[in-house]
Structure formats: C-alpha cells, structure tokens
Amino acid sequence: MSMMQLSRQLSLALGLLLAYTALAAAAQPEKSEYEPQVGQEGKDVVWVPSPQSLVDKMLDMAKATPKDYVIDLGSGDGRTVITAAKRGIRAHGIEYNPDMVDLAKRNAAKEGVSDKATFAKADLFESDFSKATVLTLFLLPESNAKLRPKILNLRPGTRVGSNSFDMEEWQPDETVTVTDGCNNWCTAHLWIVPAKVQGTWKLAQGELTLKQTFQMIAGTLKTASGTMQISNGKLNGEQITFSAGGSRYSGRVTGNVMAGKVSNGGTWKATRAAK
C-alpha cells in the first residue's frame, strides 16, 4: 500500500470517528436546569415558596423603599430578593443550598435585576446580616427563636417580616392575612427592632426608671411631687411613648439620650444613668 493510500484511509477513519463523536454527543440529552421540589428538605428548613402576594405584602408592611437594604434569610428561588430589586431596592439573599443559589441568580438575570439582587451560599445562623434595614424570612419557629437574640441586636428601627411563623414571646407590631391571590401560608408578621432603654434615666425634674419587654415598657417617673407609674409605654424603633401623671410623653432615643415633647406643651430630656 502506498503512502498516499494509507494517508487517505487514515483521513477517512479520522473523519468517521469525528462524525461518530458528534452524533453521540447530539444523542445525549441536554442537562436540565435544577428544579426545586416543594417540601424538599434543607439544612434547617423544608423548602416551601412564599406566595407572591405574601411577598408583596411583607415588603409593603415594612414600607421598603430604594433607600433600604433588604436581606432575605433562606432565600430559596430568590423571589423575595427579586421582588425587592424590581422595586428598585438593593437586596441580598442568604441560602445554604448551592443549587438554589444558582437558580436564584438565573431568575434574577431573567428579570433583569442582577445589578440589585445578589445571593450567597451561606449558613444563615453564621452570616452577618447587620447591615439590613429590612429583614425577611420564612423559617420554622425554632429557627426564628434561635435567630431572635441576633435580630434584637440589629439597629433600632430595622423592620423584620416573617411569613406565618412568629418570634414566640416577642409579639409582632403588626399582623396581616392576605386573602387575594393567596391560598396557603398567607399571614405576614412585622416587627420593628426596638431601642434598648431598660434602666435608670436622669431628668432635670427627677428620675425615670424603665423596665422593657421587647417593644413594651413600664416603670416609674419620680419627681419632686411624687412617684408616678408609667402606662401605655411602647417603643417603635427609636421612637418612645408613655403616659405618666396625666401627661403623654413622646420622644426619640439616641444612644444614651432621649428627648421629646409632653402633651401639656412642654419638653423633656433624659440621660441614661451610669451603671
């Protein structure tokens, strides 16, 4: 056999091999995109997507605007983060399942909001979400309870929205049940992280002693005319209101100082006493 004939046969064999490889590759089914199943188990949760109408309601209750930074704990397919981003809000999702993280990123890209919607594969119990001004979650009650101390240390005024599940003794500031476009998991809870005010505060006219249970406050106001019990005391983030001696006090807590107005037309200011 001549060298030319051998070369032709080798070329023909190589061509057949390449053609067979191409046909074999074409015959292989394309790898399908990951599709989560409702009820699938995760590290700390069972995945059930929040109804879109409930997601909208939680963001509405939190009065989320483009000035906010939303962080969703257990972000799943990314719908809460993406919904916030479509409102022009910078939002971030924390999710332990890497397939879910990839799915959420694809969903954000499809909606054209990848610039505002970000996702990270991380353990939500070990993550830093202290920069959130709005925190959303759809977790089991035991997870909420485990996260509660960390949430209470967030900046006063941070809004926290939860689908269905509560925070045990920490009662929500607002609860709404969605009836339109929602059949299951239709209750939204909202908490506003309260400032920490428990202790003794000094006023020009006396002493204010406060006992705090989450956003509710009680205590006494001591002046030269006597000691008065505080009633109807409540915190709304940094805003404080209470009644004492027939007057209504309202003000703002800024670190170790709080000040505001009295319903009789006066003003008041208190400084936290040194421990």
Image (spheres, rainbow, N blue to C red):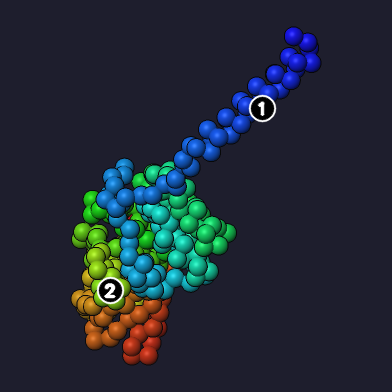
**Residue 139 to residue 64: above or below:** above
Residue 252 at x, y percent in the picture: 40, 74
The residue indicated by pointer 2 is 178
Q: Say whether residue 2 is left or right of residue 58.
A: right
Q: Nearer the viewer, residue 270 or 34?
A: 34
> Which SS class for mark 1?
helix
Quadrant of the drawing holding the N terminus? top right
Q: Say whether residue 207 is left or right of residue 12.
A: left
Residue 268 at x, y percent in the picture: 38, 79
Total of numbered circles in the picture? 2
Q: Nearer the viewer, residue 229 or 241?
A: 241
Mark closest to the chain's N terminus, 1 or 2: 1
Q: Residue furthest top?
A: 1
Q: Identify residue type, mark 2.
A: Val
The image quarter containing residue 224 is bottom left
Q: Identify residue type, mark 1.
A: Gly
Quadrant of the drawing holding the C terminus? bottom left
Is residue 259 at all visible to an observer of this figure?
yes
**Residue 94 to residue 250: above or below:** above
State the separation of the CA atoms marked 1 and 2.
65 Å
Dot 2 surroundings within 10 Å: few (below 14), some, or many (20 or more)?
some
Residue 72 at x, y percent in the picture: 40, 57
The image quarter containing residue 245 is bottom left
> Which SS class for mark 2?
loop
Seen at 46% across and 62% down, the residue is 82
Q: Residue furthest bottom?
A: 265
Seen at 45% across and 50% down, the residue is 103
Seen at 26% across and 75% down, the residue is 179
Residue 143 at x, y percent in the picture: 27, 50
The residue indicated by pointer 1 is 15
Seen at 65% across and 22% down, the residue is 13
